[in-house]
Amino acid sequence: MFLSRLTVDHGMGPFIVTYCIMFGFGIGLPYSVFLSVASSWFPEHRSIIVGLIAAGYGLGALVFTPIQTALINPNNNPNFSDPDVTSRVPNAFLIFGGIILGMQIIGLLISREYKPDNVKIPLDDSEINSSATHADETFEDDSSYDSYLEKTMKAANPKPVVSYTVLEALKCPDFYFIWFAMLFGVVTVTLQSSTFKSYGKWYISDDQYLSAIATTSSAFNFIGRITWGIISDRFSFKCPMNILYISWAIMQATFPFISQSSAFKALYPIWVFILYFQLAGHYVLAPATAGRIFGPRYLSTIYGLIFFANAPGTLILSAVVSQFNIDGKWVDVYLSCMAACLVSFCFSLFLKDVNGTCMAPTQFIAKLCDPCRHPPSAMNEENSDYSEDIWNEDLSSKE
C-alpha cells in the first residue's frame, strides 16, 4: 500500500505490481497460516473458527468502504474523474497502509500456535484401591475383565488425529476435487462481485439505493461465513457443500429473470443478499473440507495450494471477459455462473466424507476413487496400532 503511493504516479504497470501482485501475495500467503493457527486452539470447532476468520475477511468491505469514501469523495461528487476527487487518491494509500500496518502488528503480537501439554495426572492411592475393589466385585473371570480393560484403554487413548504431508495430499484425489471446486467457484465469485451492481443500475436509476444494497450485502457475507462454519461443524463438509453449490446455481439461474417483474426493485436486494450469503460458504467450506480430510498439521500449506486456484481462475476469466462486452448480457453472465456452480457441485460429489450426514445417496460416487486413496504414512509410522487395514475398515464402517 505504501509503495502504491509512489507507483500510482508512474503508470499502470508499476501500479499493478505493487497494488495487485504484491498486495495479493501479502493477503494470500498468511491467510491459510492464520486459519491453521487459530483453528488449532479449538480442534472440536475448527469450522466455526475458520468461519469467524473468513467473516473478518468479508467484513473488510463493510468497514473500510465508508472510510474510503470519506477520504476520497467526502462531498459525494458524482464525477469520479474530477480533480478534487482524484487528487485525494495518492494520500489515501498512505492512510490505509498505516491502518493495515497497525492491525497487522497487533495481530502478529497476539498470534500464538497451540502446543498441547501431554501431562498425565496420576491416580491417588484411594482411587486405585477403589478401582481395584470395584473390578474384583464386578468381573467374575479374567476374560470379562480383559474385555473391560481393553474398552477402557481405547476410551482413554482415542485414535490420534493423523495428518497428510503435503506430498501425500498432492497424491490424493480429494485434493484436486477441492482445487477444481475452488477454481470454478471463483469464476462465480468474480462475475457476481463485478456485475451485480451494474446489473442493478441497468434497471434502477437510484444510485444511493444500489450503494446501500452493496454495503448491506457485506453484512450478509459476514453473517454467512459464521453460519456456514457452524453448519460445517454440525454436519461435516460434504452435505453442506452439495447444498451450497446447488442452491447457488439456482439463485444464479433465476437472478437475470427477476428484472422482468414489476417488483424488481424489491426482489433485487433479496437475491443479492442470498447470493452473498452463499458466496460466504464457498470460502468457509473449502478450508473446512481440507482440514477434515488432510488433518491440521500441514493445513496451512495444503490449503495455501488449494487457495492458489483463485489466481488462474481470476486470470482466465479476466482474459475471456476482456474479449467481450458483457453489459446488458445478464442472462449469459448469470447462466455462466450457474454452470460454474454445477461444475463445482460435480467435483464435490466425489469427495470422501466419513463423518458426514445425509451422504448415503452420493457415497457410491465417492467410492469410485477409493483405489486412489491411501492413509497418511504417519498413521503407520507413529501409531502402529492404527494400520492401513484399520483405516480402510473405518472408512467402510462409516459409509
Image (cartoon, rainbow, N blue to C red):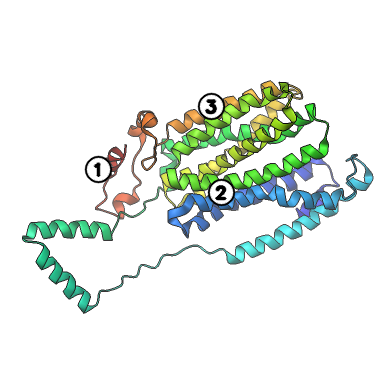
Assess disc 1: are there few (<14), some (14-19) or many (≥20) residues with their C-alpha within 10 Å of its C-alpha: few
- Residue 338 disc label: none
Cα separation, mark 2 vs mark 3, equals 24 Å
Question: Foreground residue, 354 or 180?
Answer: 354
For label 3, the residue is 342
> Can residue 89 be seen at all in this image of the molecule?
no
Label 1 vs label 2, nearer the camera: 2
- What amino acid does circle 1 point to? Asp
Circle 2: element type:
helix
Cα separation, mark 1 vs mark 2, equals 37 Å
Could you say which quadrant of the image residue 138 lies in? bottom left
Assess disc 3: are there few (<14), some (14-19) or many (≥20) residues with their C-alpha within 10 Å of its C-alpha: many
Indicate the position of residue 90 as horizontal and vertical percent values: 85, 51
Give above or below for 118 relative to 191.
below
User: Residue visible at 32% across and 36% down?
Assistant: 399
> Can residue 376 be seen at all in this image of the molecule?
yes
Q: Is 311 left, or right, of 76 in this rendering? A: left
Q: Earlier in the sequence, mark 1 or mark 3?
A: 3
Q: Earlier in the sequence, mark 1 or mark 2?
A: 2
- What amino acid does circle 3 point to? Leu
Question: Foreground residue, 78 or 257?
Answer: 257
Cα separation, mark 1 vs mark 3, equals 35 Å
- Residue 389 disc label: 1
For label 2, the residue is 226
Indicate the position of residue 143 as horizontal and vertical percent values: 8, 57
User: Residue visible at 62% across and 38% down?
Assistant: 311
